[in-house]
Amino acid sequence: MTVQKFDIVVLGGGPGGYVAAIRAAQLGYKTAVIERENLGGICLNWGCIPTKALLRSAEVFHNMKHAADYGLVAKDLGFDLDKVVKRSRGIAAQLSGGIAHLMKKNKITVIEGEGKLVKPGVLSVSKDGKKIADVQATDIILATGARARELPHLKADGDKIWTYRHALVPNAMPKKLLVIGSGAIGIEFASFYNELGADVTVVEMMDRVLPVEDEEISAFALKSFKAQGLKIITSASVTKLDNKKDTVVCTVEDNKGKAQTIEVDRVIVAIGITGNVENIGLEENGIKVDRSHIVADEWGHTGVKGVHAIGDLTGPPWLAHKASHEGVIVIEKIARDKGHKEIKDLHPIDKGNIPGCTYCRPQVASVGMTEKAAKEKGHKVRVGRFPFMANGKAIALGEAEGLVKTVFDAKTGELLGAHMVGAEVTEMIQGYTVARTLETTEAELMHTVFPHPTLSEMMHESVLDAYGKALHF
Amino acid sequence: MAIEIFMPALSPTMESGTLAKWLVKEGDMVESGTMLAEIETDKATMEYESIDDGVIGKIIVADGTENVAVGTLIAILLEEGEDASAMDSISSTQAAPAEVKTEAVAAPVAVAAPAAPVASTGDRIFSSPLARRIAAQKDINIADVTGTGPRGRVIKRDVEAYTPAAKPAAVAAVASLEGDAPFEEIKLSNMRKTIAKRLTESKQTVPHFYLGVDIELDNLLAARKELNSMSDEYKISVNDFIIRACALALKSVPEANVQFGGDVMRHYSRSDVSVAVAIPGGLVTPVIRGAEQKGLRQISDETKMLAKKARDGKLMPEDYMGGTFSISNLGMMGIKQFQAVINPPQAAILAVGSGEQRVVIKNGEMKPATVMSVNLACDHRAIDGAVGAKFLGAIKTYLEHPSTMLL
């Protein structure tokens, strides 16, 4: 067994951890990453990336089914689920290999095993239950991420009852599928399996799907999901999963206590996220944990000297891009405190400017406050809307279903929030995110020349509409 | 190629200063380190030394010129082997951006007039569109707002946190003076202008409240006498004790070691005590930094050294900037008690009167004691009455029981 010494050690090689390690190495710190499974974490191996690969297959399949709309002929349509999944796994493997290369290029030591904080400055690493190394570092970044939340009566067995991990490598194509939870994860899998022909029911506890999104966007998406044949039950919860031989009998209770049973052959549990706070030495070292997440300040400091935490482990929003951004900030803060004078422009992340994307069909993307949240905060608002059906490019693409909504403060012209549903909106939300980060008002957005013909013209028109100046609708 | 010498910024806040006196004349040889001129800022007179070798080719801004903006061309240095023709390139390169300067080179004598603030006016103020919009709506000049965004950009939160009241009030300039008696008008020195500006701002924008207390000094005087009788190498003053007592009190009542910053409150973890020192024409407040960590002798030595530098006009910006608390002592001038004006952005100042024999009543008996009245002025935005009282109580305890200062 060896004792290895580093300046900075990152526990967890996900999008928060590996990015933090790269930044640390760039600043000249001797850096290591401890990873128990795959570099790239959930995002790259079991989340963002492989689901996008599956959804792309579903999208191409959808387009094939609608070939005639484009004057094309596609016959004998079908799919090979194994190959769809194999493609997804191949992409995850390729990217994980890419991270390994990045680690090597930046001379970052990758230690494979499970790390545990022994005391500030010291971690022990074990593999298969055996201790393999002691690691010392002046600063330790905890980035162990999060996993699917389960409840005693909603426990995945990996056979008929799945979490996202099982749903990514299905043991069979579900005929009837129940998805519990209509957040990003639930609705993406519902979208995927629905497209491939499963009979999908989504149960949501809140009164609407995608409950964090703007109400109008939720309602728009709901209409679209229903038109695609998804069954949606809102204001209801699954109270019992009865695991039979070939099926699962699910008891669904609405908020008035009225119950119904639905018999399906597969269930996906997507009821939230819980932080990976167990067995990494938190309690022993006095690191505060609140509802399965580490309590850290805006710089990621835990309050224990030399111990920092970032990403999903520190709480919502549970998004890879938030984790990566925090990874850079935590390292630059450490470096600046140690006298790196060149780091002048360091700011904590502004959570109001973190965009969120959901890759169901139609896609949903947003940044900032919903209309309701803005009003609750006391803003007098101006709201702009522009529908996809009035955009030339959307019609040409055969994607005329969608909406771009913008919410402005009526007095100051601040872009309080932007909410979009429709094709490729996840690729467009960055425009509004840049606007928010730069604190542009409606005036600069109006002055911006958007290229024609693009979907992005709708972003311009929505702003114009908020001020009664929309041109094409 | 001739070297241009510009008006230096001798402190981070300096925008302009008075070119008090040239220490070299045209034709003088200078080398790196040669004192070129004395420059008077709002607080001190500083010597400006050359960083290059050469011969002074031309002095452009004359002795005694006031309000010379930082960055203004004040002289031209010729490098070895160059003659006056080398200066032509400067006149021509200067011609395009600022005509005033070209004239300055051509006719140096004429420039004793206020120098054009070329360096500062052209500066772009980085601000977000939203910050500019909100500033315009609130009638705030964006240039008055300190930016905290990327690279100091003024962003929404800065404008929202900005309190226009903090804008330096127009100093008495508007007051029309009248009086029948014969008079002589004396131009304000930069120091006098700063005192006027800062203290007007303080009285107009800082909500002062005052707490008074009497402190018995007999124990302290006995301790002082004993200390001073033990060596000739030092002489501890009552004021040294007061500085140390205040520094320790700031540590034991950290809620008093604060500054009010609009939307934040800054809590300091070190006692940097400013001590008001009267000098000809005004006063300055050199700082004893980390005074809670320093013994009486060190405080005494530093105070004497800083007071001397202050009287000689040699205080450097780092000597007088950034204290967290002030002491003003008029006891030696026989003042029984007074109230002081807070020195912003600090949040409190202690006004110290003279120690005198008074009758005190203890356990129903009249007894003589040496008593000193002190008065604490607090910024109510930062310090509430109870905190002020606790802080003043701590000062009193330290001074009445000086052995507690050993703890």
Image (cartoon, coloured by chain):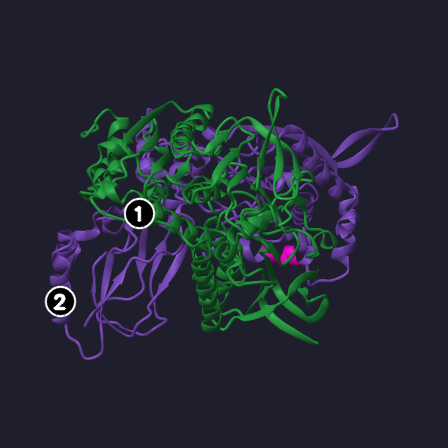
Chain colours: A green, B purple
Label 2 marks which chain's residue?
B
Residue B235 appears in the rendering: no
Q: Amino acid at mark 1?
A: Met
Which residue occupies the foreground of this view, A210 or B246? A210
| Residue A392 drawn at (x, y percent) | 19, 37
Task: Identify the image quadrant of the N terminus of chain A.
Answer: bottom right
Tag 1 and tag 2 share a subunit: no
Label 1: few (<14), some (14–19) or many (≥20) C-alpha neighbours in 10 Å: some
Q: Is residue B215 magenta?
A: no
Which residue occupies the foreground of this view, B385 or B310? B385
Label 1 marks which chain's residue?
A
Report the residue marked by disc 2: B89
Q: Which mark is residue A64?
A: 1
Q: Left or right: B367 with respect to A260?
A: right
| Magenta stretch bounds | B298-303
Count of marks overlaid on the render: 2
Q: Amino acid at mark 2?
A: Ser
Question: Measuring 25% from the left and 28% from the top, which residue is drawn there?
Answer: A465
Considering every residue shown, the one lying at the far top of the view is: A256
